[in-house]
Amino acid sequence: MSKVKELTLTSAPHSTQCEVKHNTPALVFSVGGYTENFFHDFSDGFVPLFITINSLFYNQDVTLVISDCNYLWWPQKYAEILAQFSHYPIIDIKKEPQLVFVIRKLDVGRAILNKKEVIKAIEDVGFDVNVLYPTTTHTSMARAFKLVHSSHAMLEVHGAGLTHMLFLRPRAVLVQVVPIGVDLPLNISFKGPAKNLGLECMDYKVKTKESSLAEIYGANDLVLKNPDAYVIGNYNNMRVYMRTQNLKLDIVRFKRYLVKVYKKAKKFMDMES
């Protein structure tokens, strides 16, 4: 039930100008809960829906209104079944764009230390957030594809997990959190391919105070002041930026940046609609 949002019906003010009017009753049903599981899609979804329609709206058409539809593929997969319940287009009352947050493990470096605050900030600007932990044992490729492909934006710190961008649809927003000292691999590995995929690329570049390296070396150390001069072509020195460094994002600054991300993702969602 934690995935099923409670809805409250209210009467609109008399002055409200409705752009779309319906002559049929609306039947709201949730596809949260245990949906995406074939058994539960029927036992928790289609069977109760069939009983409700045939008991309350017998010999009468209804407009289906879907709530908690977190996966783009769900109504597409069951389009033929849903068409038997109603002759009218289905209305999805979820208007928030979806963002998938790919989270790195702490032991691999470049992890976000305040991820709970980051998730709350993403929700506060209006996104519906899904979290993806791209481990080899817990996340199947099929699940990762469904989650990423149905999203309007994807966020991750620069790293291998950004390869999930292959599952995004053209015009989706790809946000890379860029730690100190990784500009070169960032541009080589992901930025060019992302543009070729038709993605909207955005970079959130970490400030010195947001990097754990500031506590280790001090803000005025060469490691932070001039990463190129520190590395000098020696990849072993890059380990400082790739493996030692973790991040604690400035939530106020990050939230301001997220507003821009939201606008682009919302534009993409509206174009699809």
Image (cartoon, rainbow, N blue to C red):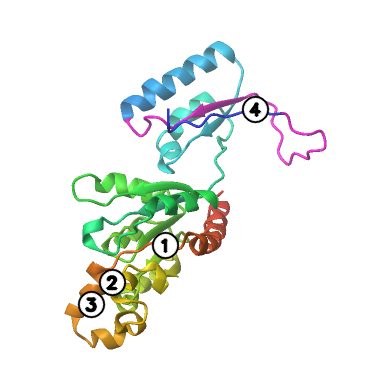
Amino acid at pointer 1: Leu
Q: Does the magenta stretch include residue 163?
A: no
Q: Name the residue under label 3.
A: 238
Element under label 4? loop
Mark 1 or mark 3, earlier in chain: 3
Q: Is residue 34 visible?
A: yes
| Real-space Cα separation, disc 3 to disc 2, in angstroms | 15 Å
Q: Identify the residue shown where x is 42% and y is 72%.
A: 207
In the image, which disc is placed on residue 249? 1
Q: In which quarter of the image is residue 118?
A: bottom left
Mark 1 or mark 2, earlier in chain: 2
Q: In which quarter of the image is residue 34?
A: top left
Q: Mark 4 points at which residue?
A: 9
Q: Nearer the viewer, mark 3 or mark 4?
A: 3
Asked if residue 30 lies left or right of residue 93, the reply is left
Q: What stretch is highlighted in magenta?
A: 11-37
